[in-house]
Amino acid sequence: MRRQNHSLRILVVEDDADLRSLYRTALRAAGYAVFAVDDGIDALQYVEHTHPAAVILDLGLPRLDGRDVQRELAAHQDTRDIPIIVVTGQTADLNESDFACVLRKPIQPQELVAAVQRCLASKR
């Protein structure tokens, strides 16, 4: 049975179409309302108009990279508290305090759902 998450909106920002679809499917199955984009500029435009409950963010994005998206969201009072869950294949050191959670690819869909649930629970 599908759990209801009160239609909390989750934004998935992933340039790989297969991963974007996998994440969207897993999150919808968990009861979330999901919107997905493939680059950082579209992500910022979506957040500006919709204010999702959380953002799933790849770092290696076209047009505007994930770190720049994070910095832009953190710079504005109305978006700085949106939890950002990074899902990345990059091995470079990250300042993990900039993100609610960091997951390293490859991940299983249930890992992503669990991370979203943890981040939203800690936000309350």
Image: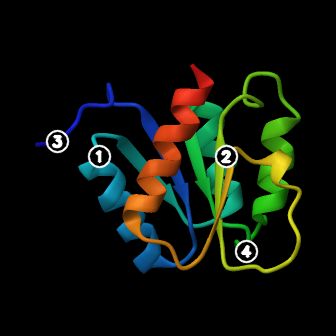
The answer to whether marks 3 and 1 mark residues whose Cβ atoms lie closer than 8 Å is yes
Q: Residue at x 78, y 66 (%)?
A: 65
Q: From what the image shows, is residue 122 above or below residue 124?
A: below
Q: Residue at x 77, y 31 (%)?
A: 80
Give the mark toward the camera: 4 or 1.
1
The answer to whether marks 2 and 3 mark residues whose Cβ atoms lie closer than 8 Å is no
Q: Work out how far the residue at label 4 is from the one at label 3, CA to CA, in angstroms.
A: 32 Å
The answer to whether marks 1 and 2 mark residues whose Cβ atoms lie closer than 8 Å is no
Q: Which residue does the numbered mark 3 point to in the structure image?
A: 2
Let me know if residue 52 appears in the view: no
Between residues 38 and 9, which one lies in front from this camera angle?
9
**In the image, farthest residue toward the left:** 1
Give, as a three-letter code, the residue at label 2: Ile
Between residues 12 and 84, which one lies in front from this camera angle?
84
Q: From what the image shows, is residue 37 above or below residue 98?
A: below
**In the image, farthest residue toward the top:** 124
Q: Which mark is residue 30?
A: 1
Give, as a three-letter code, the residue at label 3: Arg
Q: Work out how far the residue at label 4 is from the one at label 2, CA to CA, in angstroms.
A: 15 Å
Disc nearer the start of the sequence (3/1): 3
**Left or right placement of residue 111 versus residue 85 in this view:** left
Disc nearer the start of the sequence (4/3): 3
Q: Which residue does the numbered mark 2 point to in the structure image?
A: 84
Disc nearer the start of the sequence (2/3): 3
Q: Residue at x 46, y 60 (%)?
A: 111
The answer to whether marks 4 and 3 mark residues whose Cβ atoms lie closer than 8 Å is no
Q: Secondary structure at mark 2?
A: strand
Q: Work out how far the residue at label 2 is from the one at label 3, CA to CA, in angstroms.
A: 24 Å
The answer to whether marks 4 and 1 mark residues whose Cβ atoms lie closer than 8 Å is no
Q: Residue at x 30, y 60 (%)?
A: 25
